[in-house]
Image (cartoon, rainbow, N blue to C red):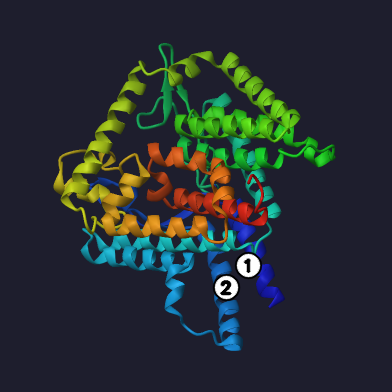
Amino acid sequence: MAILNKTIQYGTLLFVFLIPWQARLILSEGSINGKYWEYGTKSLYATEIALLVVLLALVVRGAIYIHKNKPKLNARRLYSPVGALLLLIIWAGASCVWSIDCSVAFDRWIALIEAIVVFLILSSGIVSYKKLCLAIILSGLIQASFAIAQFLLQSVPSSTLLGMASQDAQNLGVSVVETDLRRWLRAYGTFPHPNILGAWLALSLVLLVEKMRKQSQNLLDVLNYPMLIILLFGLGATFSRSAWLGFGIFLVIFVVWLFIRHAWIQGIKIALITILSVACFYAIFPEPMNTRLGLQARLEVKSNTEHMASVAQGWEIIKQNPLLGVGMGNYGLAVHGQIDDAQEAWFYQPVHNVYILILAELGIIGILLMAYSLWLIAFHGISKKTLLNAGVFFIPIIVIASFDHYLWSLYSGMMISAVYVGVLIALIRKEHNLIG
């Protein structure tokens, strides 16, 4: 049993640390109108191998437990978080039946199961919160270093080993900030899009800032300050407005909370370092910063217009498929089949809002099961006061989910969602009186 426990713990830590690693084997390419379509592409990611090892260890451990204890099935367990998540899994799997492309729905269903398993492992406390926090922050530091280098060099080199595709600001389709003078390449890290890197760095920053809430003279804790600067610069280089907004709102509320709790010295330190870092980044790169923060530049106007059109499409799909939805991963195919079938493949991407996307793919029943699961997870063994006060930690992911789709539509995003919620639930349960 000890070997199984170590396999689960260290395998999970390795998996979490390697989430940004996008090396994958493409099993079959998705296609719409004869062109490549990412959201229908089926892949085996390298990190899934590490997760498979953990799952096997869990299955063996569970089998041993069942053999020894012979637990009885109880209908009341459906009212537990695990039972609710099981119902969600069953419904999402059933959506394969009425989906436009069952193979796409099945592939996304497997990813959902993986994400739920990751969440359950992290939130259970079986893996040390301190070690999880360290793994995520170190992973974030590596990604922030990549991001800073990519932005300074204005180039993302191709690497099959790291799963990175070559990116050049002059190529169409690459994420850039376009100013009057030039096109600035946004940092990708090893992720497929700068916004996904932004979410990972936002999580790293949330955990690091939480770690810094207590004053310490320990040498390792002193290193938190330069790490904060590196992560902030990395986040800046992504030019992800949703990640900026999410982390910004969180930080303001968190610093205010520190002042209320009379930890004003730490609050001043964190606020001052953040303000100086942002000001420094702005002073070095005022041109792309002004463009990204404004709404008048050509690409910014185009982006906002596309986002609004995407949301309108999402509601149209929901109106046509309100109860059951169109099936997991089938949103783009539904837009092609039910709204407009004459566009390029890139046009058929998910709606830029996770909540609308889940409602469109799983229907009213699915979104209710999701809400029911989250409700039980939130209130299972946690006082309402503690949960209400600790809710500040969830602000970044709530904001990001309101402006983008990758937290649900892509494997890497789904894993980030699972890790984000799982590790914060673990934190709240570990320190029940964290803020309350």
Whole-Å distance between the Cαs marked 1 and 2?
Answer: 7 Å
Residue shown at the point (63%, 67%) measured from the top left? 8
Q: Name the residue under label 2.
A: 58
Residue 125, position as x, y percentages in the image: 63, 62
Q: Mark 1 points at which residue?
A: 8
Left or right of residue 419: residue 269? right
What's the residue type where badge 1 is placed?
Ile
Left or right of residue 109: residue 163? right
Left or right of residue 196: residue 95? left
Element at badge 2? helix
Instruction: Please name whichever residue, 21 or 228, is drawn nearer the observer in this view of the structure.
Output: 228
Cβ atoms at labels 1 and 2 below 8 Å apart: yes
What's the residue type where badge 2 is placed?
Leu
Residue 307, position as x, y percentages in the image: 31, 32
Residue shown at the point (47%, 67%) measured from the top left? 80
Instruction: Please name whichever residue, 81 or 219, is drawn nearer the observer in this view of the structure.
Output: 81
